Image: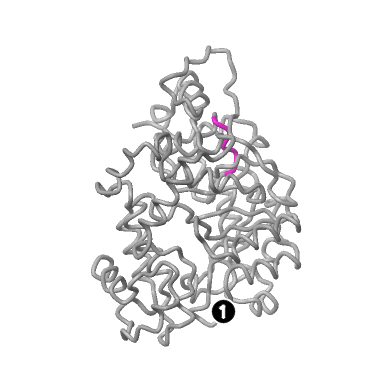
Amino acid sequence: MSHDAQDLSRRDMMRLGATGVAAAGVASLPAMAEDEKAASTLPKRRYGRTGLEIGWLIGASDWTNELIPRAVAAGVNYWHKAQRWTAETMPRALKNAPRESYYLECVVDRVNGNHERGQIDEEKHYQFVKSCLKASGVGYYDVFKFHFGYHSIDEIKTNPGMVKAFERLKKEGLVKHLAISQHHYNNIGGNMAWEILEYLADHRPYEATQFFYTYNDRKEIGEWIDIAKKKDVATIAMKSMGGVGRAANDRKFQALLSDEKYKGSSPAAAMVKWLKSNPNLTGAVIATKNFDQFRENAAAATSLAMTDQDHAMLALLADYNKGLTCLLCADCVNHCPEHIAISDIFRYDRYAHDYHELNRARSEYSTLAKNATTCVSCGDCLPACPQEIDIIAKLKDVHDLLG
């Protein structure tokens, strides 16, 4: 199929994109006239001190060609991991739009290893971004994002390579703003994500942050969001749909949704509305495979408030997740004598069960220096788990699936 054939017509893009995100649903709304402009329906929030106004739902380069023009029509204007697009694969919905109407983010990883063992290398990061720009032909990236983040506050103080690479590129007009996607690193003796982010908030030039955040998460994450708002640092939630994908394929869970107290809600919509209800959270990047998922998420993002049914739905999902779905808080890691990256292992389990990306989960799992077989079944981690997961048994199950 040609690139042209994969794109939607202008009428399709307006009809299914702009109206499809309305809470009433696509089917109940009329098609727009040929000469009408698609309205940007997604709410926008200020992306911290960058000053950018971005749609609350964050787009991603792995979204399908069929979905992207609809998302653009609905108001998605910030694109995560845009460095994956070349001049040939850049979506026409963006290529044909004024460059200043959307924002592209270039994600920069460590080199010579994974996010735990890899290195920060100023020159290689600098050259990586330049090569991506040459391949894409976009001229510049709006955001340079350090992927996975620092291992510790000490590393921030002693290794300025990532910032220096950014500063060189910014001086040349090739990037504009600096952001970070931060993970926990207590398994290798480092700091928790919010500790690193709070330090960075007081030490420029990082302007925007991305981190794990979901319903029933640790209070420290909510506190960080409030701190960030006061310091004018942007906040993007990721890995926020814990258990939603798994529940969608669970017949017993789905059968419960026929109860009137959940009518008009769904796990995904309730989660999106809960996230959006925090005025201090800039936005969320949510794995989206098709238009139905996008339509549901966008409709929830445009809703004014959570309903009683939404609150009931989240309570049901939280109960379902208990003992089953890791929220990636990493508390257990602090108690593991083998320093196993338990939350990373369970994150890959979520890729398999929530995102239905088994190959990706297996690939990520294979890079671990210590996998689930390192567990000595001591049980020291069990009392620390707020989800009451049988971590020993789950580690074995995950290894059987991914090993």
Q: Quadrant of residue 256?
A: top left
Residue 242 occupies quadrant: bottom left
Task: Tell me, yes or no, whether the highlighted magenta stretch contains residue 336.
Answer: no
Q: Is residue 5 above or below residue 238?
A: above
Q: In the visual, does 398 lie left or right of 187?
A: left
**Percent from the top left, x then y, of residue 160?**
69, 72
Measured along the vertical axis of the image, is residue 266 above or below residue 350? above
* Color scheme of the displayed model: one colour
107 left or right, relative to 372: right
Residue drawn 65% across and 62% down? Answer: 224
The stretch in magenta equals 74-78
Amino acid bearing label 1: Gly
Residue at the image point whose x is 55% and y is 62% from the top: 147
Q: Position of residue 217 (x, y in %)?
A: 52, 61
Residue 1 x, y percent position in the rendering: 33, 32
Q: Which quarter of the picture shows residue 318?
A: bottom left
Q: Is residue 390 above or below residue 316?
A: below
The residue lying at 54 percent from left, 29 percent from top is 73
Residue underneath mark 1: 190
